[in-house]
């Protein structure tokens, strides 16, 4: 039997991994559950991703793009005439107002790095990418502090179910920024 050429299979497996984790959490992740979700043979998942950690790394890398894209696409962040704290608070508001399952999934994968060392470099990439974007408007140390604060605000909103308070976020972000 000839091998079927399927250049999109790897991408479909990653997307299936994201759906499985979104629905069942990391505890529900297996090569078998991903293969069923992606509608591919079990051997395809293990061919492309030898371990579950490799699957999780690929999924985390893809989900990380969500927030980074939100930050990058916010034109006001690059304009030095705009109030950076207001712009960042707005980005957080837009991101948290989006599909909650996606935001929760991104954080579940991000926090999985606590117990899965293979995920740590990808989690760090997220922080570095956003810090790099913000370093165009402020110094790198302040940019890193902004990322930590935004991360904490998002995590608290997700964990407590408390509605996002954009004014509070703007005020706290402004306290970190010099001269704001």
Image (cartoon, rainbow, N blue to C red):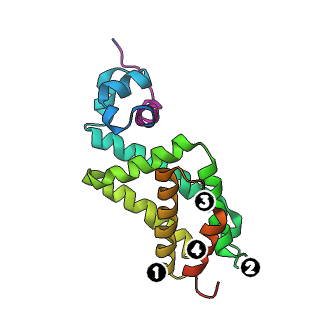
Q: Is residue 9 one of those drawn in magenta?
A: yes
Label annotation for residue 173: 4
Sequence order check, earlier mark of 4 and 3: 3
From the viewer's perspective, is residue 114 above or below residue 31?
A: below
Q: Foreground mark, 1 or 3? A: 3
Start-end of magenta stretch: 2-21
x, y percentage for residue 116? 26, 50
The answer for how far apart the CA atoms under marks 1 and 3 are is: 20 Å
Q: Identify the residue under disc 2.
A: 81
Which quadrant of the view contains residue 4?
top left
The answer for how far apart the CA atoms under marks 4 and 2 are is: 17 Å
- The crowd level at tag 4 (other Cα within 10 Å; few <14, some 14-19, many 20+) is many
Q: Residue at x 40, y 36 (%)?
A: 21
Q: Nearer the viewer, residue 160 or 172?
A: 160
Q: Are marks 2 and 1 in contact (CB under 8 Å)?
A: no
Q: Identify the residue under disc 3.
A: 92
Sequence order check, earlier mark of 1 and 3: 3
Sequence order check, earlier mark of 4 and 2: 2
Q: Foreground mark, 4 or 2? A: 4
């Amino acid at each position: 039997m000839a091998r079927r050429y399927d250049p999109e299979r790897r991408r479909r497996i990653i997307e299936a991994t994201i759906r499985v984790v979104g629905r069942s959490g990391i505890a529900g992740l297996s090569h078998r559950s991903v293969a069923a979700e992606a509608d591919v043979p079990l051997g395809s998942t293990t061919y492309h991703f030898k371990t579950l950690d490799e699957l999780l790394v690929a999924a985390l890398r893809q989900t990380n793009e969500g927030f980074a894209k939100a930050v990058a696409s916010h034109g006001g962040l690059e304009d030095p005439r705009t109030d950076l704290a207001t712009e960042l608070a707005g980005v957080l508001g837009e991101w948290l107002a989006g599909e909650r399952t996606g935001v929760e999934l991104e954080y579940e994968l991000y926090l999985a790095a606590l117990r899965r060392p293979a995920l740590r470099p990808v989690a760090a990439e997220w922080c570095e990418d956003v810090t790099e974007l913000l370093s165009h408007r402020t110094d790198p140390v302040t940019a890193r502090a902004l990322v930590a604060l935004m991360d904490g605000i998002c995590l608290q909103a997700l964990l407590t179910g408390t509605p996002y308070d954009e004014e509070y976020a703007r005020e706290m972000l402004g306290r970190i920024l010099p001269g704001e």
